[in-house]
Amino acid sequence: MQHWLDTYLGRTPYNSGEYAKAYALGYHLTGNEAYLEQAKTLLWQRYYADPEVGWAEYKNRNRFRTDGNRAAIGYAWLRFAFSNEEQAIAEAHIATWVQHWLDYTHHNNDFVGLRITDTDEITSIAGNLTMFGYLLQQSPAHAELGELSLAVADTMFDRFIVDYYMNDIMQGGAWAEGSAYSQGTQIHWMRAALINKDLRGKELPLHYIEKTAEALLHFNLAGFTGVYQYGSVEQGQDYQPVLRDKRYQFSMYLLELLQESPLQATFQDWLEHLIELQGHKITSLYPGIERTLFYQPPGSGAVQLIPSMHLSKGVGLISARTGWDSDATNLFFINRRHRVDHEHSDALNFDLAHRGTWITKQVTAYSAAGAIGNAHNTLLIENASPVGSSNPTMRALADPFYRSLHQDQKTILISAEAACAYNMRGYFGTVYAKSVNRQLALIGEQTLAIFDTVHTLPEQTRDLIRYKPELGLQEGDEYIRQVTVNQLFQGQPLPETSRLQSFRIQTNEMIGYYQVAWPEQASIQVIDGEAYWANEPQHSVPDNQRKWRLKISPSQPQVHTEVLTFFEFEGGAGKAPSIYSNAASTEQLLFDTAFQPQEKFLLTSENGTLNSDHWFGAGFVNEGTLILFSRHPDQPKESFLQLSLPDGVSIESLYILGWQPEAMIQFDVTQQGRIIEITPTNSPASNTYQATTDGLLRIEL
């Protein structure tokens, strides 16, 4: 830091407000009078020199958001060095700014017109009104306005940031405004929270601060190679080092807010590993490190592991991993509708990484084409959206939700329901889907099964009549909608002649096999992203994100669509140069090129191997595991089951999704040759099993 400060002494850098704050901090650390004079000069020139208002851009929403804290903190640190006359001038200007932004909030009219969907704006206004209010509270001429500013900021914090954001739509720690804005947005409320805590004795709920830290830890890929990104991302790329995002700044404040939490040592350990691997942020000075000057590190041996599955319920985001070592697999799943700015139409999207290497992921992009269903690993259904996305016309009917979440040493299971996100409210609103469900099973660390089941209502066509006139539908007509699985890949999917409906994907960092196991004669379209998105601007879909994908659907539209796919993969060790540059690696491959899919089998009523049409069985021979996916997840049930295994195959673990929730039931489990029967019974000698509250039944055979 001292090198940068010495370099710019006597000069006016383009980001002079940031440097003014940095020179002020440098003075307090070193006592260097040259730093003090430079800080005063830059601060006054940038924010207080205009004779009328001091800072001509104070009404600019974006400038106030980014520069407001620099004007406030810089003045707070330098106030002692200004004359009484200069203080009076500066505080009169601050009063002008504060009055404008108080009026902007409409606080006298219950904040009507304030856009609470713009969380960046809400948090930055509340944060800046807190800082400027505290400064004016100590001003001889403007103390009353300072009190009002603090009162309005407190109301915004309690009503919008805590009650609506933290306790509702962003509960669980993940912020909703996309990875380009979330960390920067959270810096606003964290900075103000620290000021309130230190100077006013007003604290935020510790549980949300801890969940924020847990979410950030979960977003890191195994081996610290990159970070999970969702929603709008500027200049997207696959692997985001610390120099390119705000994790570094974000963490400085969060570390201090965790002072009373046992999670602080774990978070510090993560931050130290991150800095050791990627270094400090050096693209510009960031004086947010002031918090660490007073930081008291926890004692040694205090690091503790956090749970390997994290639910940020407000955003509908699941972060699950098979472990915290560098060989682990990361699975991310998001299931939400639009409620704030910079969210995407990404209900039912999943991203997957192994050993710190992306196996499959959504398009990391900002808006337009990068924000709709085609850019995500999700389902597309003919609706009012041009491509069949969730959140049609930005008016989803209600929040989607999770039916089942489970993780043990062998398996991660997710069942997510999104009919509410695909159905549409409004004048042309249409409830055309009875169920839109995706079930995922990660078996071991290298096999993912995806079962999609969608029930549509052909008689519901009001949205299509309005938004798809080319279909020629009229009121009273029935129409069966096409349902499509949209699956993205890091490399080109090449057909595997040895397996039906199977593809091989290989890049410098991974090898994968993708198979459409059901339906047996699917319509499969291979799409080259470079050609498909050739006319899209860079901010919408960056060049490095224009990759391959498959579109999979039944050969003919069906009222009840079912698609079962398998994804098996081997990733690198997270050390290839392309991890950071997105350039082709020149090193040897870091994965086993001989990797092959494991043997699998299907149990269905159609092939006579399962007696019930309520479930669809997928078995994995190497793992000794059988998953019964629910074909009717909106209709849980209990049932006698008879399974017919392939010759020579045995299973150890059976997972049944879509069972009656919380059902306490006794089973007789018998096996004769290939036939396994699971019979409910009242016999006290039988084994007793209980389904979970979300309808998952696990049986060890």
Image (cartoon, helix red, strand yellow):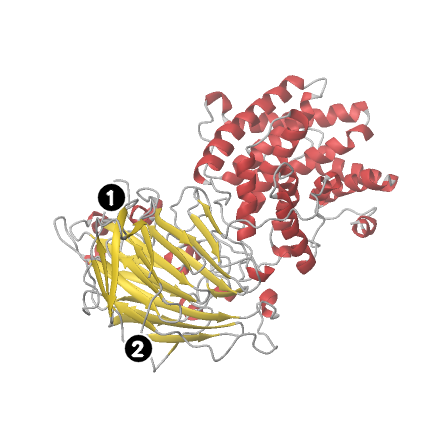
Residue in the foreground of this view, choosing between 103 and 529: 529
* Res 549 seen here: no
Taking the spot 82% from the left edge, 39% from the top edge, the residue there is: 27
Q: Is residue 652 left or right of residue 201?
A: left
Residue placed farthest to the left in the image?
476
Residue in the foreground of this view, choosing between 615 and 317: 615
Taking the spot 63% from the left edge, 55% from the top edge, the residue there is: 242
Taking the spot 53% from the left edge, 46% from the top edge, the residue there is: 182
Element on which disc 2 rests: loop
- Which percent across, then down, holds residue 102? 56, 26
**Which tag is nearer the camera, tag 1 or tag 2?**
2
- Mark with earlier residue (1, 2): 1
Residue 561 vertical placement versus 393 (above, below): below
Q: Which mark is residue 428?
A: 1
Instruction: Identify the image quadrant of the C terminus.
Output: bottom left
Residue in the foreground of this view, choosing between 99 and 588: 588
Distance between mark 1 and mark 2 Cα atoms: 42 Å
Residue in the foreground of this view, choosing between 301 and 264: 301
* Res 460 seen here: yes
Residue 9 vertical placement versus 653 (above, below): above
- Which percent across, then down, holds residue 471? 20, 58
Q: Which mark is residue 500?
A: 2
Where residue 206 sits, quadrant-wise, is top right
Element on which disc 1 rests: loop
Residue placed farthest to the bottom in the image?
497
Crowdedness near tag 1: few (<14), some (14–19) or many (≥20) residues, C-alpha within 10 Å = some
